[in-house]
Amino acid sequence: MADLPSFSGYLIFSHIIPVIMGLFGILLIANGIMDKRMEYTMGGVALFFGAAIFPFLVLPSILGIS
């Protein structure tokens, strides 16, 4: 049970932050398409893909995996 702080830390970075980033990415994509603003649409696509890649970049350093 000594590893409990690491479990709470990885849950935030693997489940909570990517979902929030993905939600804002989808909102930006929808807003950019509806208003015909390409910069919002591309920002939303980048944020959505960033949300998908974020856990793979952050979690190895948190969990100590090389």
Image: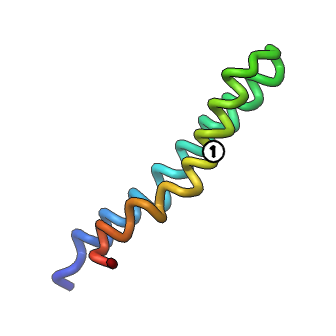
Crowding at mark 1 (Cα within 10 Å: few <14, some 14-19, many 20+): many
Say whether residue 9 is left or right of residue 27: left
Quarter of image, res 46: top right
Q: Which residue lies furthest to the left in this view?
A: 2
Image location (x, y in percent) of residue 43: 63, 30
Q: Quick one: quadrant of the C terminus?
A: bottom left
Residue occupying image coordinates x 58% and y 40%:
47
Q: Foreground: 54 or 2?
A: 54
Q: In this view, does 66 lie to the left or right of 54?
A: left
Q: Return the residue nearer the eye: 7 or 26.
A: 26
User: Residue 13 appears in which quarter of the rendering?
Assistant: bottom left
Residue 63: x %, y % from top left: 31, 74
Task: Name which residue type carries label 1.
Answer: Phe
Image position of 6 with respect to 23: above or below:
below
Rendered residue at 38%/66% (across/down): 59
Rendering colour mode: rainbow
The answer to which quarter of the image holds residue 65 is: bottom left
As drawn, 6 above or below 35: below
Relative horizontal placement of residue 62, taking residue 21 as reference (left or right): left
Q: Residue tagged by mark 1?
A: 48
Give residue 31's position: percent from left, percent from top.
74, 23
Residue at (30% x, 63% y) in the render: 9
User: Where's the N terminus, which quadrant?
Assistant: bottom left
Q: Which residue is drawn at 40% across and 64% down?
A: 11
